[in-house]
């Protein structure tokens, strides 16, 4: 009766020695972070505590139709569903490696009819040629994590799962931004179509005027041809713009998970107002970009793998126990004389492997260096994208003022030129020149307004949208898993 007690004490002492990690102490790789962004335009806020909305950052644009499309994207987009499935796979992989923290138990049963060879060596004269074997067994085994191999592997799997969660958030943000950008581009095309349609109507009236004047002998057929050229050219632009609008509508259909053959959006000419976007401090970007979080978590996962590789230099200790019943007949299978059991530890250590383990440790170090370098690259790219979109917004805002002045001047020139033409004070060539300048000015103004809004979407995307690295906390992921499971 003392043996089991002594064995239990030995097992408890052995377990107390477990989980001694061989991985280096993890430190987030250094990355160049400026104290502040470059000076920005008046459209940004200066308060670093301000944050983008946690959910529905696109609501900053105040467009109900955009809100509805974004909801459809979150519910039906195929790429988003694939990204979430990938995240679930990483969660399943973590569950697999976590299983090594617990004993593995198996049950077995067999009923076998055997025949011995008549020519078998050492077969006794009385040994039967035919016999049965029956067994009912249970096996349990457990690897004592003396050097932290299992715990390091679990830590690596957990970091990889968090990286996959950040990847999913990054895909989601990219798709949300792509939809918002495409939608704003489509509204911009609607505004261009509206402008061109109005211009076609105006040119149609101008053509009719030249025909009337020609009939009265006031002008030559040259003016009629010039007016016809302007009208036909503008109609061509209208058709091209309508074709571009159709392509944008098809792209939106795919993003929201609908067939392009049946999806339609009515024309919309009122452009959303440019939202005020909180920038914050550069350091907050490290917590608000999901791709940065993913790169950092992959560095942590690679660091934990160093411990896994190092532990291979030390012996592995396995505890195993098995027991059950074995007999040649069913009748006495579950009796005391048929009982069988085995219990004891086993120790295994590689003595010579031709440098394999050393190479594995070196590879793990290099993988960590690679992940750290990629992390720094992602950080630098993130700062570049923020600065790029800030610069675009600022410069487009300045250009907008000049373009508005140019549009007003072009309209005034066109009106004056047409009035003088009706009085016979100038040629229709002057009218054509004024028409081209006015149309170009209006189209330029519409393009600037659309591009400024699209650049604001790029800035939101560069800032990480409404995402935060707090979403990678274990309690948050557990809550998300619970919500996901309840919807299946």
Image: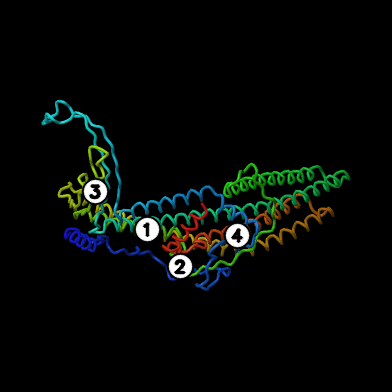
The numbered mark at residue 284 is 2
Residue that carries the numbered disc 3 in the rendered image: 323
Q: Secondary structure at mark 2?
A: helix
Front disc: 1 or 3: 3
Q: Nearer the viewer, mark 2 or mark 3?
A: 3
Give the image quarter of residue 415.
bottom right
Furthest-right residue in this view: 216
Disc 1/disc 3 C-alpha distance (Å): 39 Å
Mark nearest the camera among 1 and 4 is 1
The answer to whether marks 3 and 4 mark residues whose Cβ atoms lie closer than 8 Å is: no
> Dot 1 corresponds to which residue?
159
Q: Residues within 10 Å of mark 1 (few under 14, many from 20)?
A: many
Q: Does residue 372 appear in the picture of this structure? A: no
Depth order, front residue of 359/340: 340
Sequence order check, earlier mark of 2 and 1: 1
Among numbered discs 3 and 4, the one appearing first in the sequence: 3
Residue 90 to residue 59: above or below: above
Mark 2–mark 3 Cα distance, whole angstroms, equals 59 Å
Q: Is residue 288 above or below residue 321?
A: below
Which residue was labeled with disc 4?
A: 453
* Residue 239, quarter of the rendered image: top right
């Amino acid at each position: 009766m003392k043996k089991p007690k002594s064995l239990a004490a030995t097992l408890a002492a052995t377990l107390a020695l477990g989980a001694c990690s061989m991985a280096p102490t993890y430190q987030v790789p250094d990355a160049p972070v400026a104290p502040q962004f470059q000076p920005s335009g008046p459209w940004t806020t200066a308060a670093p505590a301000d944050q983008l909305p946690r959910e529905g950052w696109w609501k900053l644009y105040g467009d109900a139709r955009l809100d509805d499309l974004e909801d459809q994207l979150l519910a039906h987009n195929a790429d988003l569903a694939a990204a979430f499935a990938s995240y679930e796979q990483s969660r399943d992989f973590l569950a697999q490696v976590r299983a090594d923290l617990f004993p593995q138990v198996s049950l077995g049963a067999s009923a076998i009819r055997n025949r011995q060879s008549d020519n078998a060596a050492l077969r006794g004269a009385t040994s039967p040629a035919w016999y049965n074997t029956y067994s009912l067994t249970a096996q349990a085994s457990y690897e004592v994590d003396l050097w932290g191999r299992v715990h390091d592997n679990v830590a690596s799997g957990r970091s990889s799962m968090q990286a996959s969660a950040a990847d999913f958030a990054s895909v989601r943000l990219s798709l949300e931004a792509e939809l918002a950008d495409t939608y704003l581009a489509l509204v911009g095309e609607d505004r261009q179509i509206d402008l061109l349609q109005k211009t076609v109507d105006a040119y149609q009236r101008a053509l009719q005027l030249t025909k009337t004047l020609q009939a009265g002998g006031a002008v030559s057929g040259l003016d009629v041809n010039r007016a016809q050229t302007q009208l036909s050219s503008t109609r061509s632009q209208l058709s091209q713009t309508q074709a571009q609008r159709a392509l944008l509508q098809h792209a939106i259909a795919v993003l929201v998970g609908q067939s392009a053959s049946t999806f339609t959006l009515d024309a919309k000419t009122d452009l959303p107002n440019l939202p005020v976007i909180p920038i914050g401090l550069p350091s907050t970007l490290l917590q608000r970009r999901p791709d940065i979080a993913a790169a950092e978590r992959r560095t942590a996962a690679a660091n934990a793998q160093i411990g896994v590789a190092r532990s291979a230099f030390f012996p592995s200790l396995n505890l195993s126990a098995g027991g059950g019943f074995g007999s040649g007949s069913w009748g006495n299978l579950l009796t005391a004389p048929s009982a069988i059991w085995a219990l004891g530890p086993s120790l295994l250590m590689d003595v010579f492997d031709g440098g394999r383990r050393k190479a594995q440790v070196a590879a793990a170090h290099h993988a960590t260096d690679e992940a750290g370098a990629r992390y720094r690259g992602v950080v630098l790219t993130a700062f570049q994208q923020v600065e790029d979109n800030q610069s675009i917004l600022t410069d487009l805002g300045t250009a907008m003022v000049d373009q508005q002045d140019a549009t007003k001047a072009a309209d005034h020139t066109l009106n004056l030129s047409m009035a003088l033409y009706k009085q016979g004070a100038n040629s229709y060539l002057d009218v054509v020149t004024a028409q081209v300048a006015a149309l170009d000015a209006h189209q330029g103004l519409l393009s600037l307004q659309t591009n400024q809004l699209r650049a604001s979407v790029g800035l939101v995307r560069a800032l990480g949208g409404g995402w935060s690295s707090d979403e990678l906390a274990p309690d948050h992921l557990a809550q998300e898993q619970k919500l996901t499971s309840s919807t299946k």
